[in-house]
Amino acid sequence: MPLDARLLVQLAANLTSSLDLTTVSAPLNWARQLNLANGAGAGQVNRLWSDTRTVAGSATDSIDLAGSLTDPFGQALTFVRIKGLIVAARTTNTTDVRITRASNAVPLLSAAGYIPVTPGGLFVWFDPSAAGVVVTAGTGDLLDMVNSGGTAATYDVVIIGAAS
């Protein structure tokens, strides 16, 4: 099944300062769009998975990228490379969702540690190169989402990548 995708990130902001006789402003309109063709090379993707998930308080939600996922059509879905990750935490959460590198993890992070996605927060990562981040079944295929506290946290996750 062919996959064509477009990633658009945009920020519109206006910084103002009131002076004695005038108000000055510094508007910022920044946008970046990446168009992705079907395939596994540079600027290409052919695998997509998304879900809304809830991780229990102080628990870990391990997403296995090599063997346990299915696509929207019910077909088995295995990533060989991931090229994009979006994690959006619900505003109603009271704890952080932590994107964590633990044992058998996809080497998205360069060392053991985590990226916190606070309530209402958003994390976006994308690598348009042919290499992406390699997923190795059994030893480097888990994406761990760890809840920082005692109450459940809900998040949306989107993963885009390639099958070869």
Image (tube, rainbow, N blue to C red):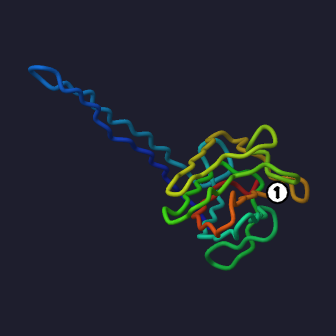
Q: Amino acid at mark 1?
A: Asp
Picture quadrant of residue 78: bottom right
The residue that mark 1 highlights is 141
Q: Nearer the viewer, residue 52 or 33?
A: 52
Q: Secondary structure at mark 1?
A: loop
At horizontal 48% and vertical 52% (from top left) the residue drawn is 6
Q: Nearer the viewer, residue 44 or 48?
A: 48
The percent coordinates of residue 47 (x first, y second) are 66, 60
The percent coordinates of residue 97 (x first, y second) are 64, 57
At horizontal 69% and vertical 65% (from top left) the residue drawn is 150
At horizontal 88% and vertical 52% (from top left) the residue drawn is 103
Q: Nearer the viewer, residue 86 or 75?
A: 86
In the image, residue 149 sits, relative to residue 28, either above or below, namely below
Residue farthest along the top direction in this orientation: 20
Please indicate whether residue 142 sits to the left or right of residue 89 in the image: right
In the image, residue 73 sits, relative to residue 137, either above or below, namely below
Residue farthest along the front direction in this orientation: 150
Q: Nearer the viewer, residue 27 or 159?
A: 27
The percent coordinates of residue 124 (x first, y second) are 56, 48
Please indicate whether residue 142 sits to the left or right of residue 44 in the image: right
Picture quadrant of residue 3: bottom right
The percent coordinates of residue 1 (x first, y second) are 62, 68
Mark 1 neighbour class, 10 Å CA radius: few under 14, some 14 to 19, many 20 or more: many
Residue farthest along the right direction in this orientation: 138
Residue farthest along the left direction in this orientation: 21
Image label count: 1
